[in-house]
Amino acid sequence: MAFKLSQPMKWVILAAVTGVSVFGILTIGPTPEVVAQDRSPIVDVRTTDPEMNAAIARARGSLPTFWASYDAPKSSETGHALKVRFSTRKGGEHIWIGEVKKQPDGSYSGLFANEPRDLPGKHAGDEVKFSEADISDWMFMRNGKIVGGETIRPTLKSLPKADADALRARMEKP
């Protein structure tokens, strides 16, 4: 292809090649769906799910690890992304955001890495602003392994075993 791919798009392509997506959408609401229009997996989780809430708490508690790498990445660390919660009429939708930037006013911006399901008029690749309070997870790649991604772990049980095992093998502890 003749155009430069953004890091989130590179991840999507890598996921397609390996057969495992790391850019799924986590939604909170009553209506289960299996895939978004952009073919990324959607996992519906109740707001009271203890395993997912614990994963979000771990991710939020370890945000300093993300910011340290974001501010001074080693040559082996790339593709910094945040999962952000957006309020919707059905409750909330957690979406991976790539190309994250800190804004002078203390907020953040980035690009939707997935096609939002419950945010009318918003699309994958659209720019969005958010605050640190909205962050529910983080990840980046280090030496080809996923660092962070705490909310990915509870969703592995919903994947076919081979996909879950392949994704688990690509994950590293920070």
Image: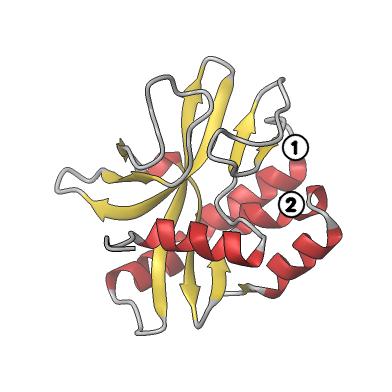
Q: How many marks?
A: 2
Direction from residue 12 to residue 163 in the image, left or right: right
Q: Is residue 107 above or below residue 89?
A: below
Q: Quadrant of the C terminus?
A: bottom right
Which residue is more in the foreground, 80 or 144? 144
Q: Are marks 2 and 1 in contact (CB under 8 Å)?
A: yes
Which image quadrant is residue 126 in? Answer: top left
Q: Is residue 44 above or below residue 108?
A: above
What whole-number distance in Å separates the C-alpha atoms at marks 2 and 1?
10 Å
Direction from residue 69 to residue 38 in the image, left or right: right
Label ID, residue 86: none
Going by the picture, which residue comes out furthest to the right? 161
Residue behind mark 1 = 49
| Disc 1 residue type (three-letter) | Asp
- The first of marks 2 and 1 along the sequence is 1
Which residue is more in the foreground, 124 or 141? 124
Direction from residue 62 to residue 163 in the image, left or right: right
Q: Residues within 10 Å of mark 1 (few under 14, many from 20)?
A: few
Q: Is residue 117 above or below residue 89?
A: below
Residue at image coords 35%, 83%: 74
Residue at image coords 33%, 68%: 70
Direction from residue 104 to residue 22 in the image, left or right: right
Q: Nearer the viewer, mark 2 or mark 1?
A: 2
Which residue is more in the foreground, 158 or 40? 40
Name the spot of residue 77 as percent of width and height, x first. 41, 77
| Disc 2 residue type (three-letter) | Pro
Q: Quadrant of the N terminus?
A: bottom left
Label ID, residue 154: 2
